[in-house]
Amino acid sequence: MKSLSFLALFPLLQPLGDTSFAYAQSVGTSILSHLPGEEFITLAQEIGDHFKKIQNAHSQIKYGDAVDPLYDPPEAAAYLGIKENTLAVWRCLGRYGIEYVKVGRLVKYRKSALDAFLERRTRSQVG
């Protein structure tokens, strides 16, 4: 049962090829069959964090030498200093015209689009 939970963390390996997924499956099964519950949870969290970093690295779009990363809604909201729900309302209403990318059902924001929004909203103080 532990190996099934462990393997649930590995869908991100599938784009790398069947060999990587099969290797992860065999290693995961052999390692996790010997771990007590708390160690399993810790390992699973570390693996999840590791693959989130990999996924974020693959979410970047390159423009020449510059990199324009894609942020998911929680990251974009944190970058703007607003609540995620506020960002969702703005997106649904089309308020402020913040550009976003739809990938299937996922919503992503380019950092450059968020920076452009902040630039448009920047006001200089007169006097």
Image (cartoon, helix red, strand yellow):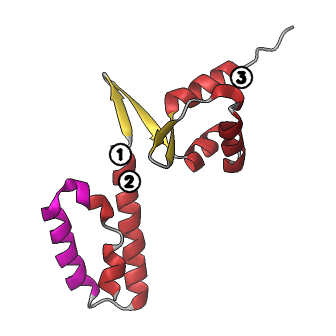
| Residue 67 or residue 61, whichever sits in front | 61
Residue type at mark 3 is Arg
Which residue, as the protein is rendered here, is positioned at the far right?
127
User: Mark 1 — residue?
Assistant: 57
**Quarter occupied by the C terminus:** top right
Q: Quadrant of residue 61?
A: top left
Residue 115 lies, in percent from the top left, at 57, 27
User: Answer yes or no: do the residues labelled 1 and 3 have beta carbons within 8 Å?
Assistant: no
Task: Name the residue located 81 percent from the left edge and 14 percent from the top edge.
Answer: 125
Q: Secondary structure at mark 2?
A: helix
The reply, left or right, for residue 107 in relation to residue 127 is: left
User: Mark 2 — residue?
Assistant: 53
Residue 26 lies, in percent from the top left, at 17, 77
Q: Which residues are magenta?
A: 14-32
Query: How many marks can you see?
Result: 3
- Residue 82 in view, yes or no: yes
**Above or below 72: residue 65:** above
